[in-house]
């Protein structure tokens, strides 16, 4: 089951942490998250799964930043989130999608117990001007049934900013 907006608000401080929290961003069954002013772009157009691919920082100025099609931008949410006993999920907002802007390619499924900022995989189908602080995506929560173990991976847990892929650690581990 998906939590209602009222249930999300009632669970704040116990099963759900959203910092900062603004009641104006609460929806009937989700909460809107905002885009931070920092993006990262990979330095190479050809990426390799077996190596650490480096990236450079881009800042979104007050007048906005035009994103190029066919280029992957990594962003992050302004809000820090944490869950206890719930599965967080991330989706783009329909108003954003209708502009041809994707905010996650495949990584919208969170693990129970995840704590940190959400890294967004941003891709556009045509040039689009984006702005820091825009409510770009929404988080919603599923209940979980049965025994479970909370997410404890050192890979992405407790992040403090944008994280590029750490898949190479899995592929090079002995």
Image (cartoon, grey):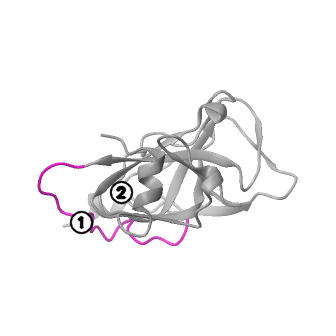
Say left or right for 151 vs 157. Answer: left
* Residue picked out by circle 1: 173
Look at 46% across and 70% down and name the residue there.
159
On screen, residue 72 above or below 84: above
Membership of 38 in magenta stretch: no
Q: How crowded is mark 1: few (under 14 residues within 10 Å), some or many (20 or more)?
A: few
Residue at the left extreme?
147
Does any portion of residue 164 appear in the rendered image? Answer: yes
Q: Which mark is residue 23?
A: none
Q: Does the magenta stretch include residue 154?
A: yes
Q: Is residue 48 visible?
A: no
In this view, 97 is above or below 160: above
Secondary structure mostly seen in the magenta stretch: loop
With respect to residue 124, does 136 lie above or below? below
Q: How far apart are marks 2 and 1 (CA)?
A: 10 Å
Tell me which corner region of the image, top left, top right, bottom left or bottom right, holds residue 72.
top right
Number of marks: 2
Q: Name the residue that disc number 2 marks.
A: 167
Does 104 appear above or below 151? above
Q: Where is residue 160 in the image (x, y as percent from the top left)?
A: 52, 72
Residue 90: x %, y % from top left: 46, 46
Sequence-first tag of 2 and 1: 2
Count residues near mark 2 (Cα–Cα under 10 Å), then give few for <14, some for 14-19, many for 20+.
some
Nearer to the camera, 164 or 33: 33
Quarter of the image for the N terminus: give it.
top left
Quarter of the C terminus within the rendering? bottom left
Contact flag, marks 2 and 1 (Cβ < 8 Å): no
Asked which secondary structure carries label 2, the reply is helix
Q: Give the range drawn in magenta.
A: 144-161
Percent coordinates x, y for residue 130 in the rendering = 75, 45
Q: Where is residue 31 in the image (x, y as percent from the top left)?
A: 53, 49
User: What kind of element bears circle 1?
Assistant: loop
């Amino acid at each position: 089951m998906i939590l209602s907006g009222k249930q999300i608000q009632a669970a704040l401080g116990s099963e759900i942490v959203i910092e900062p929290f603004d009641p104006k961003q609460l929806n009937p069954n989700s909460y809107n998250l905002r885009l931070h002013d920092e993006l990262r772009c990979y330095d190479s157009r050809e990426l390799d799964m077996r190596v650490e691919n480096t990236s450079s920082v881009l800042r979104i100025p007050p007048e906005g930043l035009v994103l190029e099609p066919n280029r992957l931008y990594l962003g992050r949410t302004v809000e820090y989130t944490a869950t206890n006993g719930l599965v967080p999920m991330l989706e783009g907002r329909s108003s954003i999608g209708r502009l041809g802007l994707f905010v996650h390619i495949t990584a919208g499924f969170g693990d129970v117990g995840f704590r940190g900022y959400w890294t967004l995989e941003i891709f556009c189908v045509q040039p689009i001007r984006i702005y820091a602080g825009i409510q770009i995506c929404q988080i919603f929560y599923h209940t979980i049934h049965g025994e479970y173990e909370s997410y404890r991976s050192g890979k992405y847990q407790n992040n403090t900013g944008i994280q590029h892929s750490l898949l190479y650690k899995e592929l090079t581990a002995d």
